[in-house]
Image (cartoon, rainbow, N blue to C red):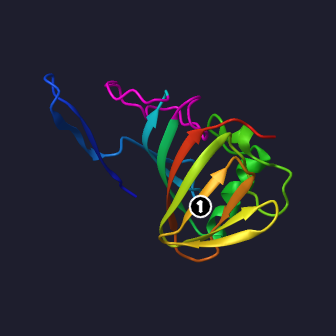
C-alpha cells in the first residue's frame, strides 16, 4: 500500500512552498498476515514546531504518539481470517514486537487477540472497507466515511470480511485515565 505524502514549508523569505512530494518514507509490516502501517507524520511538541526540517517518521516505530506530540498513520487491516495468527504470535511473545506495542497489548483479553490500549486521543477515519471496533463492553460496525473518537480505551479491531480495511489515524498524546 503506497501512500503519497506531500509536505509544505516556507522559503527563506517566508513564502509557502512544497518541500517534498513522494511515497511516505516509513512503511512496514511486522510479519505476514499482520497489519500494514504507513507512518505519515509525527509532531513532538504541542504546539507543533513547523520550522523543523528533520524527517519526523524515522524509526523506531512506537504505537503511542510521542510524549506531548501526535502521530498520523494509515493502517491496512487484513481480514481476521488472516490476521489472527500473527496476533497470536505477538500475544505469546513469539513475534518481534516493536517498541510500545508489547506494553500496550491486553494479553488477558479472551474476546480478540488484538486488544490493546494507548495513552492517547485517537481519531480513526475509515477510508475503505469495514471493521468492527471492539470495546471491553460492546462493539460497533464502522464503514467507509465513519469516524471513531478513541479516548484511551482498551480496544481491538476486527475485520470480519475477506477484504482489507484501511483506516487513517491521528493519535494525540493524552493523560492516562486508568
Q: Which residue is mark 1?
A: 148
Rendered-image quadrant of the N terminus: bottom left
Magenta extent: 46-69
Magenta part, dominant SS? loop
User: Camera-side residue: 177 or 90?
Assistant: 177
Measured from the top left, where is residue 14 in percent x and y? 17, 27
Determine the secondary structure under disc 1: strand
Q: Is residue 90 left or right of residue 143?
A: right
Residue 24 visible here: yes
Looking at the rendered image, the quarter that the C terminus falls into is top right
Q: Could you tell me residue 144's position as x and y percent? A: 49, 72
Where is residue 37 drawn, in percent x and y? 50, 50
With respect to residue 131, does 24 lie above or below? above
The answer to which image quadrant residue 78 occupies is bottom right
From the viewer's side, name the closer residue of 77 and 94: 77
Residue extending farthest bottom: 161
Circle 1: is it few (<14), some (14-19), or many (20+) Cα within 10 Å?
A: some
Instruction: Identify the residue at image location x=57%, y=77%.
Output: 162
Q: Per the image, is 55 magenta? A: yes
x, y percent for residue 6: 27, 46
Pick the front one: 150 or 103? 150
Q: Is residue 162 shown in magenta? A: no
Q: Between 105 and 178, which is closer to the camera in this rendering? A: 178
Decide: is 175 above or below 161: above
Name the residue: 51% across, 38% down: 70
Instruction: State left or right for residue 177 relative to residue 142.
Output: right
Residue 96 visible, this angle: no
Q: Is residue 130 left or right of residue 56?
A: right
Quadrant of res 33: bottom right
Point 82% across, 64% down: residue: 137
Instruction: Name the residue rendered at 66%, 56% in the picture.
Output: 86
Q: Is residue 69 above or below residue 73?
A: above
Amino acid at each position: 500500500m503506497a501512500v503519497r505524502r506531500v509536505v509544505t514549508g516556507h522559503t527563506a523569505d517566508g513564502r509557502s512552498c512544497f518541500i517534498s512530494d513522494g511515497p511516505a518514507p516509513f512503511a512496514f509490516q511486522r510479519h505476514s498476515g499482520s497489519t500494514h502501517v504507513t507512518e505519515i507524520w509525527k509532531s513532538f511538541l504541542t504546539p507543533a514546531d513547523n520550522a523543523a526540517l528533520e524527517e519526523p517518521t524515522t524509526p523506531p516505530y512506537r504505537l503511542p504518539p510521542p510524549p506531548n506530540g501526535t502521530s498520523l498513520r494509515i493502517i491496512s487491516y487484513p481480514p481476521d481470517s488472516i490476521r489472527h495468527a500473527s496476533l497470536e504470535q505477538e500475544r505469546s511473545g513469539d513475534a518481534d514486537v516493536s517498541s510500545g506495542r508489547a506494553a500496550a497489548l491486553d494479553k488477558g483479553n479472551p474476546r480478540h487477540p488484538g486488544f490493546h490500549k494507548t495513552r492517547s486521543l485517537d481519531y480513526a477515519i475509515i477510508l475503505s472497507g469495514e471493521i468492527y471496533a471492539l470495546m471491553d463492553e460492546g462493539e460497533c460496525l464502522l464503514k467507509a466515511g465513519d469516524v471513531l473518537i478513541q479516548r484511551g480505551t482498551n480496544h481491538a479491531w476486527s475485520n470480519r470480511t475477506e477484504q482489507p480495511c484501511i483506516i487513517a489515524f491521528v493519535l494525540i498524546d493524552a493523560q492516562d485515565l486508568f
